[in-house]
Image (tube, rainbow, N blue to C red):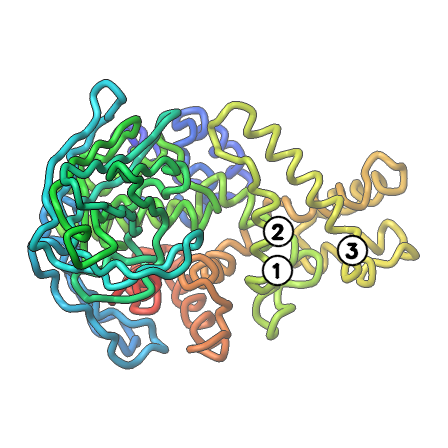
Amino acid sequence: MREDVAKTISSALVSEPKLVSTRRKDWRHKLGHYSMFAAVPAMVVSHLPEMVSEAATKTDEHVAKQDVKDPRRLSSAGRSRSLLKRQSMFRLPHQRGNFSILAALSGNDDCPGQIIPGGTYTATAPYTDSGNTTSANDTVNSLYSFYYGAYETSGPDQIYTFILTDRGLNPQIKVSSTSNTYRPVIYILEGGTSGSCPAGTKNEEVYSVSVAYSDSNGIATLDALQYLPLNVPLHLFVDGLHNDAMGAGPYTVRIQDVTLAPEVCVTANPIDCTNFFVSQHYQDFLNRQPDLTGFAHWTNEITQCGENAQCIELKRINTSAAFFVSIEFQQTGYLIYRSYAAAFGPTRIGTTVPLTRSEFMPDVQRVAQGIVVGANGWEAQLEANKTAYFNEFVQRPNFAAAYPSTMSAFEFVDALNANAGNALTMSERDQLAIDLIGGTKTRAQVFQAVVENAQFTYAHFNRAFVLMQYFGYLKRDPNAAPDNSFAGYNYWLAKLEQFGGNYIQAEMVKAFISSGEYRKRFGPQ
């Protein structure tokens, strides 16, 4: 985001909900699909200047009335390994206990391995390297692959680490033995909880995302690179199946038709790496892989801090919050929240929230399907998705039971309006009922009109913001274990409202992304 555009956003102090739509269109024009802040309701937008100025000078303090320890400085610029060794002690109010920490990396042949330089490697200009597994560490004892099942990997190995950002039509990794006896097997482990690089721990049954065996000529070729995840640390192991002469030897590695990131961040917990952090937010909040331009923008927002830990912490918090307030999430995830609130009341679940995560996830995936804000035709695709969603929603048995066909048009609108906190004006209410009677609007269209009402959208923003901290970051309902009640949700809602929606002052986003529960999704705390 350019500095002049950022200043435009910060100075756009919206004081009335009805101005949100106008501001959103203006910012969307300025920012294109970077417009993460274009859907910010008035209560958040108006606080952006204070958020930036306060957080830039704020020192670590105890959070008022929280039974937590201070967070240590967040160190994840991706340019210094020492800066990436942060292990947070931050706890959400309900959390207690200690979390195990993996042993420090050790050994010449353990992760992160040899870093492959960033760049685009083609068939005519591939990445090549020569190595020898003789006398190397036996880092992994056994492996599990979805396609090959479990097998032993008792030969020593050499490791290469890289981040894949793009691939061409024929991406390939090939390891050729230069020995008459050595027969390599190569496999790739993904950084993160599903197949963490074992770092010499001798872990067994590690999940392998891709594997290739040597042929009779001593060549192992990995072609299925289209299944590898983008923008996360990947570790290529050059190994052998045996401990005898066939288990180790010299080799040549060749990689082609791929684009690799210029920097690789490898830490005990990959969420401390900027690339992984941003990529995970696309998956957690937008249910998709990052588009290259947006990914580059948000990673740059953080890495431009260099090694300034305070700047990094602020940028990570604001980047994280930006995914919730983005056009894309507001028109998908927040739309689903409001649909359940308008249909069945905002306190349907445990007298506190309108829906569960198990209800939320399939609906948001349906509405968000094929949507990348800024891509050609995204607005038309979004409207088509929403139309199909609301048409299907009103046919659901629970909706039909709550709004039987015997209800008059005015009764139907009034029931929805009551759940929406009487957000409709009298003229809006009358017009929707008249449209329904006259056949110019269907039940689904009237329902959508209530869900998308500006006052209703404005009124529930904080409630949805808190709920999505649980759905997105912790992947659970707020009353699930370890909370087992809505006490945590109520705590953060009260605190966010205490500070008028200012998530920086409320320290809400900071608390969730620094919490042990969130960090344990990806590695040690």
Above or below 411: residue 232: above
Q: Are marks 2 and 1 in contact (CB under 8 Å)?
A: yes
Mark 1 residue crowding within 10 angstroms, few (<14) / some (14–19) / many (20+): few
Name the kind of residue labelled 2 in the image: Asp
Residue nearest the observer in this picture, 356 or 178: 178
- The quarter of the picture where the N terminus appears is top left
Quick one: SS at disc 2?
Answer: helix
Q: Which residue does the image show at 16% across and 57% down from the upper left?
A: 244
The residue wearing badge 2 is: 363
Residue type highlighted by circle 1: Glu
The CA distance from mark 1 to mark 3 is 25 Å
The Cα atoms of the two marked residues, 2 and 1, are separated by 7 Å
Quadrant, the C terminus: bottom left
| Disc 1 + disc 3, Cβ < 8 Å | no
SS at badge 1: helix
x and y percentages locating residue 488 in the rendered image? 43, 73
Q: Which residue is mark 1?
A: 359
Proximity of marks 3 and 2: CB atoms separated by less than 8 Å: no
Secondary structure of the residue carrying numbered label 3: helix
